[in-house]
Image (cartoon, rainbow, N blue to C red):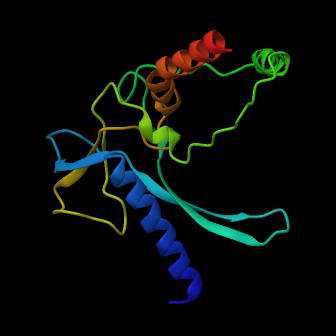
Amino acid sequence: MGKESDLWRESMDEEMLSLLEHVTWEIVKKPEGVKPFLIKWVDKIQRDAHGNVERYKSRLVAKGYLHTQRIDFDEVYAPVSKQTKLRALLAVVAERDLELHQLDVKTAFLNGELEKEIYMQKPQGYEQGGAEMVCRLKRTLYDLRQTPRAWHMCCRIVIVIIVIIVIVTG
């Protein structure tokens, strides 16, 4: 194995650690009649503005295109922000001479809670238990069709509270 394969393995280990810290799933015996959905590793090299390698990024994603509406999920709708709302927010920030900070939550989509029981195969290279064991998702995973909506439902109350506090306190 070369240096690059070690870097990719390190990247996968980092992603697995994040998934385990978020208690994204639990290992359970596969229920009768359940077909766990497939997953895959997606790897990407992140580069800086000069093209130099910043980091190796691995992400465990669901093969969401294989999910069937009304069986695997009911709703996928998640609101998106519109440019007019962003401009209005920026206008309020400028008018009141406030500071605005951008926040990039590295694992934001892992915070959504699922409304239905979903089972997935065990991550390749990190298998636990016997062949009859699968992962029962407790939180959303990247590329599930319902992930954006689940994340929005989880975070909308917090966002509203923050906006109210900013408006009230000025």
Residue at the bottom extreme, as displayed: 1
The residue closer to the viewer here, 96 or 21, is 96
- Locate the C terminus by quadrant: top right
In the depicted structure, whether residue 143 falls above or below residue 82:
below
Visible residue check, residue 143: no
Residue drawn at the location 45% of the way across and 27% of the way down = 150
The one nearer the camera, 21 or 167, is 167
- Residue ranking furthest to the top: 168
Instruction: Residue 166 in the image: state x and y as whole percent.
Output: 63, 17
Could you say where residue 42 lies in the image, as x and y percent from the top left? Answer: 55, 59
User: Horizontal placement of 56 versus 63: left or right?
Assistant: right
Side of 152 relative to 169 (left or right): left
- Residue 73 shown left or right of residue 107 in the figure: left
Instruction: Kindly indicate the quadrant of the structure image that contains residue 69.
Output: top left
Instruction: Name the residue: 23% across, 40% down.
Output: 34
For residue 2, above or below residue 68: below
- Front residue of this view, candidates 55 and 12: 55
Which quadrant of the figure has residue 123? bottom left
Residue 92 visible in the current orientation: yes
Q: Residue at x 77, y 21 (%)?
A: 86
Q: Is residue 134 above or below residue 117?
A: below
| Position of residue 3 in the picture relative to residue 13 (left or right) | right
The residue positioned 41% from the left and 20% from the top of the image is: 74
Count the labels in the image: 0
